[in-house]
Every structure is written in C-alpha cells, then in structure tokens.
Image (cartoon, helix red, strand yellow):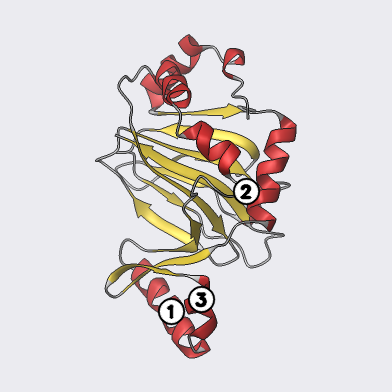
Amino acid sequence: MHLLSAQFDPAGYQSRFARHGRIRLEGAISADDAQSVHHALEQQTPWELHLVGQNGPEVINRHELNRLPESDIQNRLQEAAELAQTGLSYLRLGYTPTGDDALTPLSSRIRSAEFAAFCEALTGLSGLELHSLAAVCYRPGDFFTRHTDAAARLCFEWNFTEGWRPDWGGQVLFHSPSGDIEGGILPRLNDLALYAGDQPRSIASIAPYAGGPRFSLTGRFA
C-alpha cells in the first residue's frame, strides 16, 4: 500500500499545525486502497467491545460477548453511559492489528519509518516513535467523552467511513479551555487527521438514526 506523500506540501501543513495544533489530509493513499481498507474494517475485522466501567477500561472479546448474559452486557453499557455524565468514558468497538490480518497492508505502512517521517515532515516534529495503533468502530449510541493525551507528542486518526452526514455525529471535536468547540473533523473516507496529544477533544455520540458505523485507525506517537 503506497503512501501518496509527494502530493502534500510540508511547509503549508507545518504552518497550520504550528497555529492550530492539528491538520487534516485528504487522500493519503489511493482511492482503491482506501476502499480495500474500508472493506477490511466492515467485513473482516474481529471486533471487541471496548468501554469504561466502574473498575476502569474494559475489553470484552467476541467469545466473552457470546457467553455473557444479555443483562450483564446491558449493565456494563449503562455503567459506561453513567460515567460519561461526569468524566472520562467511552463505548465503541476496537481491535489491535496483528500484522497478520486483513488490515496488514495499511497497519504495516503505519508502523514503518516512512510514515513517521511523513508525519514529521507535515508537523515539524522530529524523532516520532509509534506507541500504539488500533482500529475502532463507532455504532449508533457509541461515544468518547472529552479527554487529552499529554503523554503523546502526536495523535492521528485515519478515517475510512463512507457517505457520512454531519447530523449523524461522530465528529472529532476540539475543545477550548472554556468548553467551546474550536473545531471539528467530519468522518470521511481516506481522511488522515494529525493533532497534538494535549489538545482536549471528544468523539461526538453517534446518532441512533446514523446510516452505518464509523470506521478508522487511530494511533499515538511519543
């Protein structure tokens, strides 16, 4: 999977990143490759349930989901929603690419020195080292409340969502110190967003009438 780095002007993106702490790139891989990633996320990814419960973050794999009573699952979903009223919480599907799955063409590229150098050229940062990578899926009702990641020098979200409407929610929202929304990024196919880890942000809750799931790969550099 080829990274289309030559089509992006580093100077312009560095200037924007210096001013706002975030940039957005359209079409960092070819349209055909983006469709392949979308298909892998939609049809070939063994999703797990990721949420925050009373004891902190939880991961419930497919085997556990199949054997848990429906009442237990509903209780955990309710806990995540209640915690969201007062602080950090999230509810979504997640998966860590293994390097031997349908996401390997893209995950291998993200883990390469080429991708780190690409991000450095566009942000003006140096010495970036990838510390985490995950595929995520937000369905109707899923969310991620306001949070920061001060330990990360740079975070990214590479979105692979088709035909998304603004009223369906799911935007990455950036918050000012006073709580206002300073900006937002709509889920789009083959959109790569890079932003400073210490920026307060959230993922807007997905509307119950959304026409499908929201897919992306996210990661952080230290």
The structure residue drawn at horizontal position 69% and vertical position 57%, both measured from the top left corner, is 43
Disc 2 to disc 3, C-alpha distance? 20 Å
Q: Nearer the viewer, residue 19 or 49?
A: 49
> Where is residue 89 drawn, in percent x and y?
37, 63
Q: CA distance from mark 1 to mark 2?
A: 32 Å
Residue bearing the label numbered 2: 102
Give the quadrant of the N terminus: top right
Is residue 210 visible to us here? yes
Residue neighbourhood size for the residue with mark 1, other residues' Cα within 10 Å, grouped as few (<14), some (14–19), many (≥20)? few
Assess disc 3: are there few (<14), some (14-19) or many (≥20) residues with their C-alpha within 10 Å of its C-alpha. few
Identify the mark at residue 134; answer none if there is no mark: none
Residue that badge 3 annotates: 63
Question: Which mark is nearer the camera, 1 or 2?
Answer: 2
Sequence-first disc among 2 and 3: 3
Q: Amino acid at mark 2?
A: Ala
Which residue is nearer to you in this view: 44 or 156?
Answer: 44
Q: Residue at x 72, y 60 (%)?
A: 211
Work out whether 126 lies above or below 214.
above
Q: Is residue 181 visible?
A: no
Q: Position of residue 21 (x, y in %)?
A: 38, 28
Relative to 164, does residue 129 appear above or below in the rendering?
A: above
Picture quarter with the C terminus: top left
Q: Is 103 situated above or below 46?
A: above
What is the x, y in percent for residue 106? 57, 37
Quick one: label 1 or label 2, which is nearer the N terminus? 1
Instruction: Where is residue 163? Give x, y as percent.
Output: 73, 47
Give the residue type at disc 1: Gln
Q: For the residues carrying marks 3 and 1, which lies nearer the camera in this image?
A: 3
Circle nearer the N terminus (3, 1): 3
The reply, left or right, for residue 56 in relation to residue 170 is left
Q: Badge 1 is on which residue? A: 78
Q: Element type at marker 1?
A: helix
